[in-house]
């Protein structure tokens, strides 16, 4: 890793004891990592540099045709004072799947992981320590070749920045209300729904605005073909806690990955932890009627969304058109909260890492 000095932008990065006021993604640490790709030389050596503005040609392909992919993951302050990344190999593989879809050259997984470890080691003092806070890492690759030609670029830039974060939602763990959109879809078969492509998010902003106009905090996406099958909530995966069948264990259901849903790392982790805990874990195509009738007859006990940024968010109400459904009152979402705590205990190094999900960062001088 080449370490370069350069003119720094004031990052205004937070101190680790700036508890409770971090919000999400509004301030950044002192450094960043860049890696260039050229058709002649492939991926170059990573450079750890001061956090600064990017110098991009205004004709950069990524700015015009959206040839960009990104990832999101977190580093957590461990109970013993160290710092560990959570399942970074998953993100290393997923950014390459995204790159394949966007015709971007794949970055060797070891380079991706080395960049993460180098930035977290450099800025480890800015990893917050309170439970609920972490260092959010945002790697992305942008096509930087200056051309308005409509084709994949011949030059790319990988960039990794880091942001000390608290709650993703301003309400913290308060349950959210959701609006089922019949106007918009997030992803169609053959599209980009299964990869982390910025256009998926920008194209969701209008639906999110529609949800807000309907008095709801988040949008729920149905499939694009039949407008019947539950896909995601905003930028998160969805889970349902339902009565067991024939007196069997409680079921934990989530929509099956059909090629239009993003395979979330937290989604995968929760499925594993729930199976460990003896839940009847299922990945199925779930029609919207399953949700509606489950809340009508009380068989659906809890609904929550999962993602790297917010971890787990309970859902308390769902609106579609003129109708509204409500979660059973007074449950306190025990399964949702227990799974969240189980996951956080692993992420913060409180419990044993039986699945090998923590990737400890070697800190300088420690
Ligand atoms: C996540 O939490 O996994 C997300 O994708 C949200 C992020 C885009 C802020």
Image: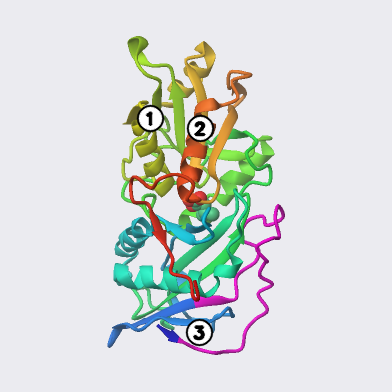
Contact check, label 3 and label 2, Cβ < 8 Å? no
Residue placed at 46% from the left, 59% from the top? Answer: 84
Quadrant showing the N terminus = bottom left
Q: Mark 3 or mark 2: which is in front?
A: 2
Residue that carries the numbered disc 3 in the rendered image? 57
Q: Residue at x 41, y 29 (%)?
A: 228
Helix, strand or loop at mark 2: helix
Rate crowding at label 3 as few (under 14), some (14 to 19) or many (20 or more) other CA atoms within 10 Å.
Answer: few
Q: Are marks 3 and 1 in contact (CB under 8 Å)?
A: no
Marking on residue 227: none
Q: Main secondary structure of the magenta part?
A: loop
Residue 91 in which image quadrant? bottom left
Q: Secondary structure at mark 1?
A: loop
* N-terminal label among 3 and 2: 3
Stretch of the chain drawn in magenta: 3-32
53 lies above or below 204: below
Taking depth in this image into account, of 276 and 37 the one nearest to the observer is 276
Task: Residue 344: give x, y in percent of width and height.
Answer: 50, 44
Q: In terms of secondary structure, where does tag 3 sit?
A: loop
Residue position for label 1: 277
Residue contact at pointers 2 and 1, CB within 8 angstroms = yes
**CA separation, marks 3 and 1?**
52 Å
């Amino acid at each position: 890793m080449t370490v370069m000095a350069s003119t720094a932008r004031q990052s205004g990065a937070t101190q680790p004891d700036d508890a409770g006021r971090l919000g999400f993604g509004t301030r950044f640490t002192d450094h960043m990592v860049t890696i260039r790709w050229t058709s002649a030389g492939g991926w170059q050596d990573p450079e750890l540099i001061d956090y600064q503005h990017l110098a991009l040609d205004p004709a950069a392909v990524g700015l015009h045709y959206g040839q960009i992919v990104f990832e999101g993951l977190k580093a957590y302050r461990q109970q013993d004072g160290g710092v560990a990344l959570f399942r970074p190999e998953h993100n290393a593989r997923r950014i390459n799947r995204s790159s394949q879809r966007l015709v971007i050259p794949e970055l060797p997984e070891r380079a991706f992981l080395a960049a993460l470890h180098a930035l977290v080691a450099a800025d480890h003092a800015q990893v917050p320590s309170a439970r609920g806070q972490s260092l959010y890492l945002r790697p992305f690759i942008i096509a930087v070749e200056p051309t308005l030609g409509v084709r994949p670029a011949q030059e790319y830039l990988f960039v990794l920045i880091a942001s000390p974060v608290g709650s993703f939602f301003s309400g913290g763990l308060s349950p959210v209300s959701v609006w089922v959109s019949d106007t918009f879809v997030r992803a169609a078969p053959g599209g980009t729904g299964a990869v982390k492509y910025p256009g998926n998010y920008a194209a969701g902003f209008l639906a999110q605005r529609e949800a807000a106009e309907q008095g709801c905090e988040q949008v729920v996406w149905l499939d694009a073909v039949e407008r019947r099958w539950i896909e995601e909530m905003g930028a998160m995966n969805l889970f349902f806690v339902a009565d067991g069948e024939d007196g069997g264990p409680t079921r934990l259901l989530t929509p099956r990955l059909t090629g239009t849903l993003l395979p979330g790392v937290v989604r995968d982790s929760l499925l594993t932890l729930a199976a460990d805990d003896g839940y009847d874990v299922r990945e199925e195509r779930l029609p919207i009627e399953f949700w509606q009738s489950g809340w009508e007859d009380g068989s659906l006990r809890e609904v929550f969304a999962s993602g790297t940024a917010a971890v787990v968010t309970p859902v308390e109400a769902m609106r579609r058109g003129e109708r509204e459904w409500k979660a059973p009152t007074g449950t306190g979402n025990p399964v949702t909260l227990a799974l969240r705590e189980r996951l956080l205990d692993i992420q913060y190094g409180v419990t044993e890492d039986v699945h090998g999900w923590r990737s400890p960062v070697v800190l300088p001088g420690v």
